[in-house]
Image: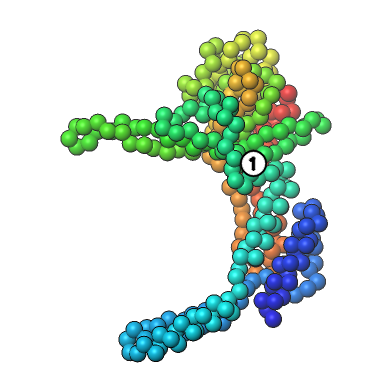
Amino acid sequence: MHNQTTLENIEAIRQLLAEQPSPDTLIDRLKHWQAQQNLYIKNYLYWALTTLSLIFLLAGLLFSAYYLIVSVVLFSLGIRYRIPTSELENLKEQLRVYMLEQTYKVKFQQDEPPLNHALLDHPLFQFGDKDNIVTTLLAGQIIVKEKTYDYSVFKYRYAYSVEKTDEQGQTFYETHHSNLWGVLMENFPFQGISISAAHKSRCHLGIEWQSSDIRFNQKYQQSGVNEFEFVKFLTPERLLALENMMLAFHSDFYVDPHTGLMCWLLNESPLAENNYLFQAITVNELAEKLEQLQMPKLQRLQDAFASLLKTL
């Protein structure tokens, strides 16, 4: 009876999700759930039969082969009465994805497709001498001043060689692997702009530049391809927005001088979650955990990026 109620609740919540309610409406409906609250599977009989099966298996190995037959029968019965938890786990995953996508106005790329091959020539994707792999994690939109800006968040995996010397003085190379993350936006309205917190040589664009802010100049390497373009770009308002971005994440900001592709390269993943859905064993608890479901670093990224977009 308990498991049947749980399965009915799973189906009812799945039907509610199909209506595509807002996050607030979904949580409210779950908080005021009219049916029973059960939201976990009891497999006590399965575990009891499996335990007995192991006991008879041991007895069969020590005393008589007849116990082995009993062990097989008990194990088969246990498998027959076991109810899979996959439906419940799948429902929680569907709820997680739906809530996050609705809350942050993004679309997760479940298969993490590789970046367009033409974009892989970007200088910030050339750190590896062994391998450079860029995959898209999500696509999103930010609306600023009634204008919609499309962007994507990516993960950049690269492998590089490090020269080492062994105890005999022989030189050999070790392969190291690193990960970076970032934001891409095509058709940025300015081109040939580079601001690097790490003073990366690959970020250098030829013409050194300094803004009117002495503190900003001390912290960030700035370069470009056109002085006039830099003067137009580095307004006081935009400097403040860029510093907010650099403070939000230790990062590099680069706009390709030919394509206008903007890359904001981060040293940490912005997709960490506060996710406690696995703890929910009642519908009310599920509603509570959905309220707590957050991606604080993604929110920080969106806020910082929006502050720059407001200046464009």
Q: Nearer the viewer, residue 60 or 266?
A: 60
Locate residue 159: give its quadrant: top left
Q: What residue appears at the point 36 percent right and 87 percent down from the top-left corner?
A: 65
From the image, which quarter does the N terminus lie in? Answer: bottom right
Q: Nearer the viewer, residue 122 or 299?
A: 122
Query: Which scheme is used to colour this image of the protein?
Result: rainbow
Q: Residue 115, position in %: x, y?
A: 58, 34
Q: On the picture, is 42 further left or further right than 157? A: right
Locate residue 16: give its quadrant: bottom right
Q: What residue appears at the point 62 percent right and 63 percent down from the top-left corner?
A: 89
Q: Nearer the viewer, residue 137 or 308?
A: 137
Q: Nearer the viewer, residue 202 or 310?
A: 202
Q: Is residue 96 above or below residue 262?
A: below
Q: On the picture, is 127 further left or further right than 149? A: left
Give the secondary structure at mark 1.
strand
**Would residue 247 be visible to someone looking at this image?**
no
Q: Is residue 252 above or below residue 297?
A: above
Q: Which residue is mark 1?
A: 138
Q: Residues within 10 Å of mark 1 (few under 14, many from 20)?
A: many
Q: Residue 238, position in %: x, y?
A: 68, 23
Q: What residue appears at the point 69 percent right and 64 percent down from the top-left corner?
A: 286
**Would residue 76 be visible to someone looking at this image?**
yes
Q: On the picture, is 57 further left or further right than 266? A: left
From the image, which quarter does the C terminus lie in? Answer: top right
Q: What residue appears at the point 73 percent right and 70 percent down from the top-left corner?
A: 9
Q: Residue 49, position in %: x, y?
A: 51, 83
Q: Is residue 98 above or below residue 33?
A: above
Q: Is residue 291 above or below residue 211?
A: below
Locate residue 308: give its quadrant: top right
Residue type pointed to by label 1: Leu
Q: Residue 300, position in %: x, y?
A: 64, 40
